[in-house]
Image (cartoon, rainbow, N blue to C red):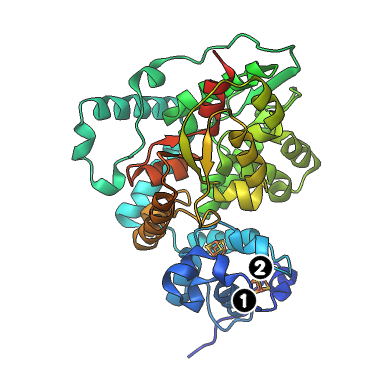
Amino acid sequence: MTQPEPMSMFDADQLAACVQCGFCLSSCPTYETTHLEEHGPRGRILAMRLVEEGELTIDDPDVVDSLETCVQCRACETVCPSLVQFGSLMETARAEITERQPPRGPEGLAQRLLFAALVRRGLLRVGGILLALAQAVRADRLLPARLRPAQRVALADTLRSYRLPPPGAPVRGEAFLFRGCVMDGLFRDVHQATAQVLAAVGYRPRFEPAPPCCGALSAHAGRESEAHALAEATIAAYAGTTGPVLVNSAGCGGAMKEYGKLLGTEEARAFSARVKDLSELVTPEEVAARGGEVPLPLAYQAPCHLRNVQGLAEQARDLVAAIPGLTLLEPDDEQQCCGSGGIYSYLQPALGDAMLARKDASLQRTGAQGVVSGNPGCAMQIAREGWEIHHPAQLLARSLTP
Ligand code: SF4
Ligand code: SF4
């Protein structure tokens, strides 16, 4: 039997940085689910090392299972004493697996259709309208349970064009609202609420330019060249503008803040510095001073890419907690992933469902009436358990605008 050739695929310094200490294990939602070493960060890095040393090939079924079951939440990065950049190692691995074993059959077709649709704004808009119509007449029940979006979509929101709200404070300048793909198709009400919040604190919100997709889902799925092309197109779309690019989807914001790392250019780094979450433009003090009451007991669930990539979980929580009258409850496993992971819950349903069940149990223990989440994937995943989801922008808009 011939041994696989050693290959240079991964960043050798990053692989060497892992001292196999295991501090990351308890932060990993897939390890916490199966308790198998190969489903934890340490086992995954070991698999990458064995591939790099030529002991195993990247398309070995055990290697593929170890790497493809990672939900890419990046919780392991935040606790690693050696600062291993697990996210970029995993994106390299996924790109290599996808190149060698492109998804085939019905799953491959579904992925090709999905990724083709993400860059076609008109198609996503029509999809949002059809989903809202189907939900209105309850025809969505005909869809297989796994493909049925649990998040309610209001027909009026999908049909309405964005409206420019009147300024509510002395104008600070323009803020460009990144509309994205799924957010623009299914969460137009969140975009409208975000614009209201921006206007209320003195920004002039802009809905254009509107590049089609940030490329985060492509990067996670190993579609490397597509992810690069979408990142470049997004940066190019904002050329000639100045001011913050406000991103109200935590996954998109995380990806766009890492364009500098992804593309390695000065232009990309400068663009990433413009990307902001709402919690970076609005302060808890101005919400507490000017906001109206929103008397709801809600559980706060920080999306993984807000916590582990953007490092803004606490800041974003404090902003929502400042809303007068709102009671913000913290689940006891708040740092654990809900199992959404972009399209992970469709590709790894058993693991995704197990993570969701744990998340649901922790949310139930808070006694909350609903959940606050600033990411469309998490919103759709947690809504599957019957929770009403509130985006921070919707709560802030309700508080800050009459
Ligand atoms: S915490 Fe860091 S160094 Fe330790 S096993 Fe995990 S990835 Fe490796
Ligand atoms: S990114 Fe998340 S799922 Fe993947 S190894 Fe790290 S902690 Fe585990």
> How many labels sit on residues?
2
Give the percent coordinates (x, y) of residue 212: 54, 31
Q: Tell me if residue 359 comes above or below residue 269 in the rendering.
A: below
Image side of residue 331 versus residue 171, left or right: left
The answer to whether any part of residue 283 appears in the image is no
Residue, far bottom: 1
Neighbour class for label 2 at 10 Å: few (<14), some, many (≥20)? some
Q: Tell me if residue 368 comes above or below residue 345 in the rendering.
A: above
Give the percent coordinates (x, y) of residue 395: 52, 28
The answer to whether any part of residue 400 appears in the image is yes
The residue that appears at 62% across and 76% down in the rendered structure is 22
Picture quadrant where residue 257 is located: top right
Q: Nearer the viewer, residue 30 or 114?
A: 30
The residue that appears at 55% across and 82% down in the rendered structure is 4
The residue that appears at 59% across and 78% down in the rendered structure is 46
The amino acid type, in three-letter code, at marker 2 is Phe
Picture quadrant where residue 283 is located: top right
Give the percent coordinates (x, y) of residue 201: 68, 19
Give the percent coordinates (x, y) of residue 81: 73, 69
The residue that label 2 is drawn on is 10
**Disc 1 residue lies near ligand 1 with CB under 8 A:** yes
Q: Tell me if residue 132 comes above or below residue 330 in the rendering.
A: above
Labelled pair 1, 2 in contact (Cβ < 8 Å)? no
> If the image is split into quadrants, where does the C terminus sit?
top right
The amino acid type, in three-letter code, at marker 1 is Gly
Q: Nearer the viewer, residue 29 or 322?
A: 322
Helix or strand or loop: what does disc 2 sit on? loop
The residue that label 1 is drawn on is 22
Neighbour class for label 1 at 10 Å: few (<14), some, many (≥20)? some
Point out the quarter of the image occupied by ligand 2: bottom right
Image side of residue 50 versus residue 297, left or right: right
